[in-house]
Image (cartoon, rainbow, N blue to C red):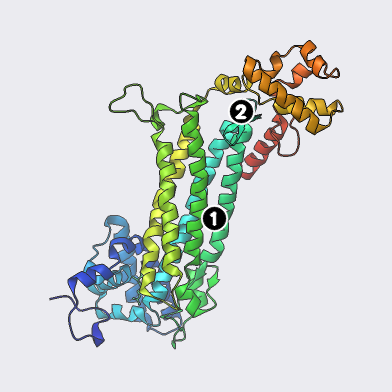
Amino acid sequence: MPIKKMWGGRFEEGGDKLVDEFGASISFDQQMAKEDITGSLAHVKMLKATEILPAEDADKIIAGLEELLQELDENGLPFDVENEDIHMNIEALLTEKIGPVAGKLHTGRSRNDQVATDFHLYVKERLPMIIDAIKGLQEALVKLAKDNVETIMPGYTHMQHAQPISYGHYLMAYFAMFQRDVERFEFNKKHTDLSPLGAAALAGTTFPIDREMTADLLGFDAPYANSLDAVSDRDFALEFLSNASILMVHLSRLCEEVIYWCSYEFGYIELSDAYSTGSSIMPQKKNPDMAELIRGKSGRIFGDLMGLLTTMKGLPLAYNKDMQEDKEGTFDAVKTIMPSLKVMSGMINTLSVKKETMAHATTHDFSNATELADYLATKGVPFREAHEIVGELVLSGLKTGKNLADISLEEFQKINPKIGPDVYEVLKPEVAVARRKSLGGTGFDEVKKQISQAEKLLNL
Ligand code: ARG
């Protein structure tokens, strides 16, 4: 015999087990148990204050909910799929505890505003945790950047050597990306910080409820202005998932480079043993599995976003059961990005930089070609012409195995008599970097400025 549903009054026949299981959300929405009880506590305190419920009944409900909260904290609560979702499970447990007076809790409320409230509370509580974890990663990047202001590496465009840059400068570019992530999650708070409670099923309620009071008790900025919007808005979760997706794009790009750079061909960095794995067959292997895994996990976060966008896109106002699909992807995103950020921070904190290998890559290439073209331009050669001249030098250098700095002064002067012995200084990679003093450029002083601004931002 199936148990009687809380909404079973207008039904004549019992439920179908398969349907009950398919419709149930308790397997995952139990993650909002704390939020559900907290929401109910605010609701019942308001029902007492507005005298919608006699104080004596309200007090019994409050005491029962507080006990449940404590039990949840200590040993967890026993949930039953027969009770469908977290809201009805908590009410069933409350009824077991205090008897039929528990049924008064749902006065002036619906599961529609209840689930929206729980979900807002869930996301609201996690936003600062995510922001903190991003800041942890930013701190690791700033520290590494500080140690590597004067570490020279090839800067790339099209994955081809372009111009030498400071490794610190490179790291600070990621710092800037993660700073935008912090700001996006900060903004996410604004739309999450609204209370749907009291919107009831869709239209508000005839009871003289006080929505300001429940919003206040729950720590929300304000109640939603429109009851239909309150129960059907999932923008805050969509914003959360799109912020999480952009964050994963950044993590994934960083991982991609970590993977390349610890390869035999590059050898720019080495990951610590703790953040690497071996192979069961090839004894020599030290694999960057963690970076690959984070790069791989970006896929599931994009999937979580696409899932919710698609779920929401055709929904008429107000609540539809489709919206029960809003939670798993969001929970998954939280469960994925938190450890991804922590592992990435650990990886950055413990990697070692092969400064010589990095620098060496810029002394055996043509990444100083722009320097020579600029040098000629400062001697009055039109830049287009200078570009052509240097291009030809590169071409012949590629054939003879000579770099630009290997060309003798005599040969240089045959090309243009204005070239003097000072050209060799200009061709040095570290000089090329140091001279890029334009605002936000890779010049050492500019990189130091970025680092000190970042330190201020992080209160380091
Ligand atoms: N479990 C539901 C959800 O997650 C709660 C709201 C149910 N409301 C309803 N009218 N069926 O969306």
- Quadrant housing residue 433: top right
- Mark 1 touches mark 2? (CB < 8 Å): no
Q: Nearer the viewer, residue 105 or 193?
A: 193
* Mark 1 closeness class: few <14, some 14–19, many ≥20 residues within 10 Å: many
Q: What amino acid does circle 1 point to?
A: Phe
Which quarter shows the C terminus?
top right
Give the quadrant of ligand 1.
bottom left
Would you say 217 lies left or right of 95 here?
right
Please identify the quadrant where the N terminus is shown.
Answer: bottom left
**Residue 413 screen position, x and y as percent:** 82, 15
Q: Could you tell me which residue is drawn at 75 percent across and 11 percent down?
A: 408
Residue that mark 1 sits on: 185
Which of the marked residues, 1 or 2, is nearer the chain's N terminus? 2
Task: From the viewer's side, name the closer residue of 316 and 125.
Answer: 316
Q: Is residue 434 left or right of residue 413?
A: left
Q: Quadrant of residue 156?
A: top right
For the residue marked with disc 2, what is the amino acid?
Pro
The residue sitting at 44% across, 78% down in the picture is 318
Which residue is more in the foreground, 353 or 284?
Answer: 284
What's the residue at 43%, 53% (across, down)?
A: 301
Instruction: Decide if residue 44 is on the left or right side of residue 373.
Output: left
Name the residue beneath numbered marker 2.
154
The local crowd at label 2, few if under 14, some if 14 to 19, many if 20 or more residues have their Cα within 10 Å, is: many
